[in-house]
Image: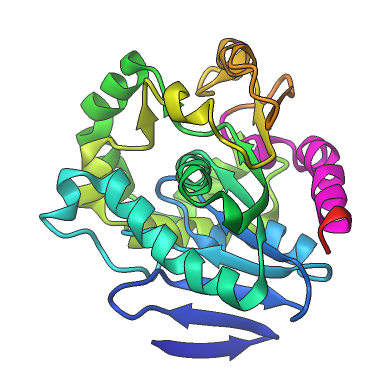
Amino acid sequence: MSVEFMGGVMFVRPRCDILARIEAGAYGKRLLILCHGVTDSAASLDELIDRFSPTHRIVAFDSLGHGHSPSFTGETLADPIEAARLALEQSIAPLVAKYGRAIAVGHSMGAALLSRAAADHPEWFTGLILEDPAWLTTEQAARYRANGPAEAKRIGDMVGRERETIDTIDVDYPLWPRTELAGWLQAKLNVDLDFVATGAVGYIEPWQTWLGDLTVPTLVLSSDGDDTLLNRDGLRLIDSLANPALTTMFVPGLRHTMRRDNPAAFHQAVDPVIARWTEEHP
């Protein structure tokens, strides 16, 4: 493992058995874990890192096959989401032992992985914020699998077209935190394209069977954009589980990347919850 410091932020590159991560913020503060979605990385979470590092100890992970974490192997590609979960749990365990129970924020695949880690190890977490988690219907999963090779080619074709790619983001996401653009693009250039080609992005039905037993306080957010995974129907399904640990929130007018579509709306929903959990469990 190697450690680098830059501007008060610690970048931790992995041994072969754990994930790379960015650590920031004050020691002695509540641990806040951040987990990204498919083809992103810890560096593409810069706005969250900057926002919460004054009040929390931040650890933002590169998921397996992303950023500076190890790539998938032929064996782990057979079930990449399970491999990513195991790597995440191996990486969280020593952090919780060092810093105490964590609040965790995840998007898409990262949210799905965190939810399963919390189901396996509820003692690790104070609460979860899950932004449109990748809990898929069988139809959604089939579409992602079918589109996997084309998505891998699309990402691979960004090489040599970096300026054009950034210009497209400027048009599609006018409110996107500008500080995250370089990290987002670098994540695309680093991601394991063999993994992207599998089309695996999260958990497939019946994920409700274990989510219904989750005991960690959890806020699940979704919206109504055409690429959202849960939308209103998914949130209603979660509500029907009647699990008191689960709270849902519908924020209209956003796409799957809710925070990037409208950071102000996202933080208006999320920040008070994180503040409450932090105050209740210092």
Measured from the top left, where is residue 203 in percent x and y?
Answer: 37, 32
Asked if residue 157 can be seen in this view, the reply is no
Which contiguous range is marked in magenta? 256-279
1 relative to 148, above or below = below
Asked if residue 99 can be seen in this view, the reply is yes
**Between 206 and 138, the one nearer to me in the picture:** 206
Residue drawn 56% across the image and 35% down it: 214
Quarter of the rendering containing residue 282 = bottom right
Residue drawn 51% across the image and 51% down it: 36
Measured from the top left, where is residue 132 in percent x and y?
Answer: 57, 31
Number of numbered tags placed on the structure image? 0
Residue drawn 57% across the image and 10% down it: 233
103 relative to 118, above or below = below
Please, which colouring scheme is shown?
rainbow
**Left or right: 282 with respect to 195?**
right
Q: Quadrant of the N terminus?
A: bottom left
Quarter of the rendering containing residue 256 = top right
Q: Is residue 261 magenta?
A: yes
